[in-house]
Image: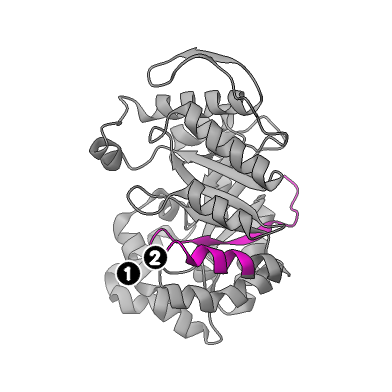
């Protein structure tokens, strides 16, 4: 995939007060950022509601939904939400749909027998509905009888799969319009994800979330993010296991602890995310573009005041 300029925006954390989305959206829109990604997790704030509010106060900003749990709404209602947002905004919507945390799905009484099958059925039927089809579908999770949207969107957005594992990435390559890769989506993980997805369509959209901490003092940024990195290593996520220095990083942490992570090589931090100086962040963005990324949602730590401070860095990175 040829490298090109990626759209750069910011992620709005699930814990932030809903009204704050208006200020973030206005400032990003006025400052020249490309996107605002709304983070929806169960029992926090609702993605489509926040997206509608942000779209109403902006003129050019694209709103990403990252990500809607596949079975929390029916496929028809999910399609209605996306179609409505798209028509309200002139197509300024990028919807992501994922498995959802299975313990949350169980709490709500909607946990599917096969999350993989459920996601495939939902993405397939939502995509067909958005394209104006009349859909009848009898699956394991999705059941539709002659359903057709009264107002399908005139500009149909790609339905992105918010996934991370090999089987789910392969599913995305078959049925989705792209992927949303959660933080820390390093360039290495992007390449891994593309190998697993093996998309056949040339317009397959790759969106990533990158943990953001830009400060004038590189060491201060590393110190702030050391607890985050320690937890990441402890959780041993797929994203961490794809790091080219994975074994060295685990050994470093085992030998030196959380405080020792402050001293890992700058190049390791640059692979993990836009963490350090603005120049470090620019290098990370360039590496993501080289890996083929189309959309980058910069994700500051979940501190409202610090996130507001990081808006300036987001705008600088967007206008690079």
Within 10 angstroms of label 2, few (less than 14), some, or many (20 or more) residues?
some
Q: Quadrant of the N terminus?
A: top right
As for residue 15 lying within the magenta part, the answer is: yes
Residue 253, label in figure: 1
The answer to whether one can see residue 164 in this image is no
Q: Residue 164 versus residue 61: which sits nearer the camera?
A: 61
Left or right, 68 with respect to 110, comes to right
Q: As displayed, is residue 79 above or below residue 253?
A: above
Q: Residue at x 57, y 58 (%)?
A: 297
Q: Residue at x 67, y 50 (%)?
A: 294
Q: Quadrant of the C terminus?
A: bottom right
From which residue to which does the magenta span run? 1-26
Residue 301, label in figure: none
- The residue tagged 2 is 249
Q: Residue at x 44, y 73 (%)?
A: 304
Percent x, y of residue 191: 58, 47
As for residue 4 lying within the magenta part, the answer is: yes
Outermost residue, bottom side: 217
The answer to whether one can see residue 58 in this image is yes
Which of the 4 image quadrants contains residue 246? Answer: bottom left
Which of the 4 image quadrants contains residue 107? Answer: top left
Q: Are marks 1 and 2 in contact (CB under 8 Å)?
A: yes
Percent x, y of residue 284: 61, 66
Which of the 4 image quadrants contains residue 260? Answer: bottom left
Q: As displayed, is residue 4 above or below residue 126?
A: below
Left or right, 171 with respect to 240, comes to right
Q: Residue 143 versus residue 316: which sits nearer the camera?
A: 143
């Amino acid at each position: 995939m040829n490298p090109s300029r990626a759209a750069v925006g910011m992620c709005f954390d699930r814990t932030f007060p809903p009204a704050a989305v208006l200020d973030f959206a206005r400032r990003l829109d006025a400052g020249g950022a490309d996107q605002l990604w709304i983070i929806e997790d169960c029992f926090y704030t609702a993605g489509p509601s926040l997206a509608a509010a942000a779209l109403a106060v902006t003129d050019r900003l694209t709103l990403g939904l990252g990500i809607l749990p596949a079975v929390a709404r029916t496929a028809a209602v999910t399609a209605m939400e996306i179609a409505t947002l798209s028509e309200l905004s002139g197509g300024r919507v990028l919807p992501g749909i994922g498995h959802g945390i299975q313990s949350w799905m169980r709490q709500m009484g909607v946990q599917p027998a096969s999350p993989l099958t459920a996601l495939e059925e939902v993405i397939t039927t939502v995509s067909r509905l958005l394209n104006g089809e009349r859909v009848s579908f009898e699956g394991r999770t999705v059941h539709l009888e002659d359903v057709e949207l009264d107002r399908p969107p005139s500009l149909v957005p790609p339905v992105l799969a918010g996934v991370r594992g090999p089987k789910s990435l392969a599913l995305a390559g078959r049925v989705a319009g792209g992927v949303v890769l959660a933080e820390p989506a390093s360039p290495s993980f992007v390449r891994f994800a593309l190998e697993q997805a093996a998309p056949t369509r040339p317009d397959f959209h790759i969106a990533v979330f990158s943990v953001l901490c830009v400060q004038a003092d590189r060491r201060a940024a590393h110190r702030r993010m050391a607890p985050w990195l320690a937890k990441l290593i402890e959780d041993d996520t797929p994203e961490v296991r794809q790091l080219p220095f994975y074994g060295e990083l685990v050994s470093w942490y085992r030998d030196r602890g959380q405080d020792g992570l402050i001293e890992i090589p700058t190049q390791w931090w640059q692979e993990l995310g836009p963490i350090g100086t603005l120049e470090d962040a620019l290098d990370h963005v360039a590496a993501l573009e080289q890996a083929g990324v189309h959309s980058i949602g910069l994700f500051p730590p979940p501190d409202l005041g610090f996130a507001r401070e990081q808006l300036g860095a987001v705008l600088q990175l967007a206008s690079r």
